[in-house]
Image (tube, rainbow, N blue to C red):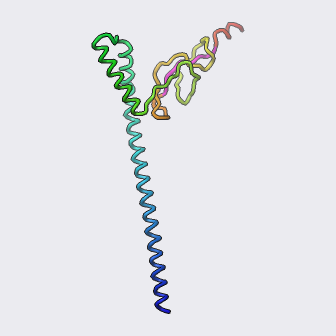
Amino acid sequence: MEAKKKEQTKDAAAEKYLDQLKRVQAEFDNYIKRSAKEREQIELLGRHKLLVHLLPIVDDFDRCAHNVSAETDVGKGIHMVKKAIDKFLEEQSVRRMDVVGKSFDPYVHEVLKNIESDKPEGVIIEEIQTGYLFGDKVLRYAKVIVSKGGKDENNRH
């Protein structure tokens, strides 16, 4: 009888240790997953910060490429570098926003000016500074000029 009780005590202790081991193993697995996710988030934040600081250089280079002829040797070189920059941005999941003619959205556009025009109210007339998306998040808001409404409407009153 006493042997049976000792066996039950050993089985209970073994069950207890097995349960503790399973819990520690589950906690460790969760730690590994959490650490991997945190590393991903840190990497993403670092890429985001780098890309934000790179955008003014991209803007300057775009203006340069726009104002130089691709027929000259210098122009060819500038356009080649611009293509390389565009490819790099694409590889980093960065896209330029296409805003002219679209409706104003305060979540992706920053209004610099409202002007009267023949376009309906709230339609973007001009892009002052290109906006960029990083994946599905705004990297930089597009700075735009938005229509107040039709000039024709004001003349009718």
Q: Residue 66: percent from the left, percent from the top?
A: 39, 14
Vertical position of residue 80 compared to residue 108: above or below: above
Tell me which secondary structure the magenta stretch mostly adopts. Answer: strand
Q: Quadrant of the C terminus?
A: top right
Q: Residue furthest bottom?
A: 1
Whether the magenta-drawn stretch holds residue 40 is answered as no
Q: Residue drawn at (27%, 13%), measured in percent from left and top?
A: 73
Q: Residue drawn at (57%, 21%), measured in percent from left and top?
A: 102
Quadrant housing residue 106: top right
Q: Residue furthest right?
A: 157
Q: In the image, 43: left or right of 136?
A: left
Q: Residue 139: percent from the left, percent from the top?
A: 45, 31
Vertical position of residue 129 compared to residue 2: above or below: above
Quadrant housing residue 82: top left
**What segment is highlighted magenta in the picture?**
141-149
Vertical position of residue 39 compared to residue 147: above or below: below
Q: In the image, 153: left or right of 108?
A: right
